[in-house]
Image (spheres, helix red, strand yellow):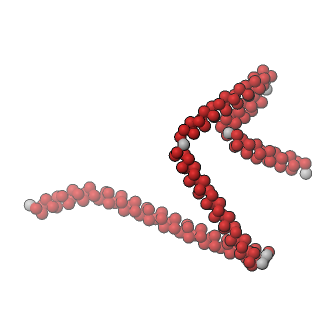
Amino acid sequence: MKDFLTRQVRTIVGGAVAPVEAAGNRLIGTVVRMASIAGVAVVALIAMLICLSIALDLWLTDIANPVIAALAVAGFYFVVAVICLILLLAARNTEADAETTPASVAEAKKTDTRLSANIEETVGPFVEILRQSGLKREEVAVRLAAEATKQLGPVSLVGLALAAGFLCERALDARRK
């Protein structure tokens, strides 16, 4: 009787455990496969960087002496490392600020609302004049510019204006030549 009950329990438990065991094996297989592919990709990336460093050093050796070439390659990697560290610290500070200052976010939203109202108040008369004059395209352009100003903010807007000015200057300069 004991053997019969033991077989029954094993059959029931085995039937319940088999799908879980199969899913675990598939998961482990997938994780191992992805980890091995990622490992191969990292090794290939490191080999590529080594080959590029050697090629850069040999090219710079033809231009300058070997010591200067080695220092230039090392300096390049130093600059890349410093930039990565700065980005890492900035991301860490941003995460810490986001967690600790929810009150400042509410204040920024108030400022955005005031800024939006100020933009609407400033642009409103111009839009009305354009509407009365029948200049539909210009009216739409002014409205779009006002919406972009509200969404971008002052610093992004200045950057966008600088980039647009640079591109327009290049286009005009190309036409003159």
Q: Name the residue: 16% across, 61% down.
A: 7
In the displayed structure image, the side of residue 157 where residue 48 appears, left or right: left
Q: Residue at x 44, y 65 (%)?
A: 32
In the figure, residue 25 lies in which quadrant? bottom left
Q: Is residue 30 left or right of residue 13?
A: right
Q: Residue at x 48, y 67 (%)?
A: 36
Q: Quadrant of residue 2?
A: bottom left
Left or right of 25, for residue 45: right
From where the camera sits, is residue 144 visible?
A: no
**Residue 99 percent across, percent down from the top left:** 52, 46
Q: Position of residue 39 (x, y in %)?
A: 51, 68
Asked whether, in this view, residue 176 is left or right of residue 70, the answer is right
Residue at the far bottom in the pictured view: 66
Residue at position x 78%, y 78% in the image: 65
Query: Where, quadrant-wise, is the N terminus in this rendering?
Result: bottom left
Q: Nearer the viewer, residue 111 or 48?
A: 111
Residue 152 seen in the current view:
yes
Q: Is residue 19 above or below residue 77?
A: above
Along the line of sight, which residue is nearer the eye, 134 or 81? 81
